[in-house]
Every structure is written in C-alpha cells, then in structure tokens.
C-alpha cells in the first residue's frame, strides 16, 4: 500500500515538472518571436546591404582634383606672340624705342582706370626667359614716371590726362655708358629718349621735359622673335637713366 502511494507521488511530481518545462518553452518561444519582429535580421555575410541602408550610411567627401602641373605666372613663348596696343611690329629698334617712350608717359583718367593704364603698359614689357628683367623692376620704374595709384585717383577727379612727344633719341654708340659697358649679346639695344610731356587737368596745364631709357631686344638675339624687336625694359628713375 505504501509503495503504491509513493509511486503516485512520483508520477504527480514528474507531471508537474513536465508542465513547468512546457510553460518555460512556450515563454521562450514567445520572447524569441517578439524579438524577431522588433529587430530586423542582418543580411547574410557577403551580401550587399539594402538600398535604404546604403542611403542612410554617411558618404565620404569626394577627393579634390589635383593639378597636373604647377601653375606658372609667365609663359615665355606666349609673351613672344603677343604685342601691346600701339606696339609696332618692326626690326627698327629706334622706332620701337620712341613708340614705347611715348606710351610710358601717356595716360588719360577719363578713359581708363589706374589698373587699366598699368596693365596696358605692362604688355610692352616682355620678360626674358632668364628672368633678368623681372616685373618687380617694371613696377618700380612705372611709379618712377610720377604715376601711382594715389596720384592717379586725385587726377581722376579733375579729368587728368598726360601726353608726350619725342624731342630727341640717342641710341647705342651715341651713349657713353653703352660704349663703356657693351650689352651681353648681339641684338640688345638701348635708346635714351627725351620727351616733351604735357599734363592736362581742369585746374590747368603743366609742361616739362624728361628722359627715359628703353632697352630693346631684336634679331639675331636668340631671346627675340625672329621677325621683330621687343621692349624688355625701361628706366625712368634718375639713377637708372643711360647717358
């Protein structure tokens, strides 16, 4: 009788354990199902992400294009192909020197700004390939003519303008300094031109004479165009004039 009672109790105990295991398994299945609904499944390894994932991902900035070569401020070949406004295409260095001298001392505030006048005269100055006549010298000699931004601005208000005509020109062997120190190559010429300058303004007129030395490079110089001469420098500062 006691043995039967013990068997019944054991069976009831196993039944309760089975029920508890079923309940636990059902709870775990429910939790797993809920988590699977709330968390999207990761794509299998090796597959590309969905378009929405690609759109949401931050994109790295595009790389800046790199120059193929460093920029240059001067192209000697292009310099030889260009001519300034009013610059004659000639192999007569004296004619070119006189034309350049007039251009250097001519401007009109009624028709051009200071920057435009500066740029126009800059085109007369052709930089040599060896850089022996840099544009820093051009800037100094341009202001040595008595023209700078401040003066030009004040003259603009009174409609200032300046013109020049050639009085005399001495070139090469006519200049003692040229004879004492000959140029380093054939085709390089120097002319010192004396100008009669007239400055006009609504307040009055001013007249004076002034020298300017022009350096001209012509064939057969290897640094000159084959068919014409070029201005490669001018000197307006008193200590640079060639006599």
Image (cartoon, helix red, strand yellow):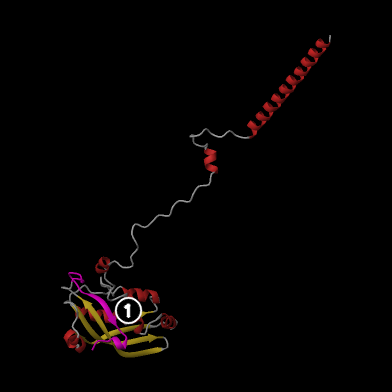
32 sits to left or right of 135: right
Residue depicted at x 44% and y 52%: 63
Viewer-nearest residue: 115 or 111: 115
> Is 237 part of what is drawn in magenta?
yes
Residue hosting label 1: 137
Mark 1: secondary structure? helix
Residue depicted at x 24% and y 85%: 192
Q: Name the spot of residue 29 as percent of width and height, x first.
A: 67, 26
Q: Does residue 122 sit above or below 37 in this rendering?
A: below
> Is 228 part of what is drawn in magenta?
yes
181 sits to left or right of 112: left
Which image quarter holds the C terminus?
bottom left
Q: Residue furthest top?
A: 1
Viewer-nearest residue: 22 or 176: 22
Q: Name the spot of residue 19 as percent of width and height, x first.
A: 74, 20
Q: Residue furthest front?
A: 2
Which image quarter holds the N terminus?
top right
Viewer-nearest residue: 182 or 207: 182
4 sits to left or right of 24: right
Viewer-nearest residue: 192 or 157: 192
Residue depicted at x 35% and y 81%: 140
Residue depicted at x 18% and y 73%: 221
Q: Does residue 171 sit above or below 19 in this rendering?
A: below
Q: Name the spot of residue 222 as percent of width and height, x first.
A: 18, 71
Q: Does residue 161 sit above or below 36 in this rendering?
A: below
Q: Name the spot of residue 185 as percent of width and height, x first.
A: 18, 77
Boundaries of the magenta span: 222-243
């Amino acid at each position: 009788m006691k043995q039967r009672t013990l068997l019944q109790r054991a069976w009831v105990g196993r039944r309760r354990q089975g029920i508890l295991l079923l309940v636990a398994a059902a709870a775990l299945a429910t939790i797993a199902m809920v988590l699977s609904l709330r968390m999207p499944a990761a794509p299998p390894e090796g597959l590309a992400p969905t378009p929405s994932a690609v759109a949401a991902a931050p994109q790295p900035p595009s790389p800046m294009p790199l120059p193929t070569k460093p920029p240059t401020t001067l192209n000697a070949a292009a310099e030889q192909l260009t001519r300034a406004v009013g610059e004659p295409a000639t192999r007569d260095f004296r004619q070119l020197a006189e034309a350049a001298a007039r251009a250097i001392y001519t401007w009109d505030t009624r028709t051009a700004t200071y920057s435009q006048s500066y740029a126009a005269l800059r085109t007369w100055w052709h930089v040599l390939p060896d850089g022996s006549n840099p544009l820093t010298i051009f800037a100094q000699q341009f202001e040595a003519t008595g023209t700078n931004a401040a003066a030009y601005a004040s003259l603009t208000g009174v409609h200032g303008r300046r013109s020049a005509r050639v009085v005399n020109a001495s070139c090469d062997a006519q200049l003692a300094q040229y004879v004492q120190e000959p140029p380093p190559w054939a085709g390089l010429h120097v002319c010192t031109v004396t100008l009669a300058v007239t400055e006009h303004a609504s307040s009055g007129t001013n007249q004076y004479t002034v020298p300017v030395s022009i350096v001209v490079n012509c064939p057969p110089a290897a640094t000159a165009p084959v068919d014409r001469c070029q201005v490669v420098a001018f000197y307006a500062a008193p200590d640079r004039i060639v006599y």
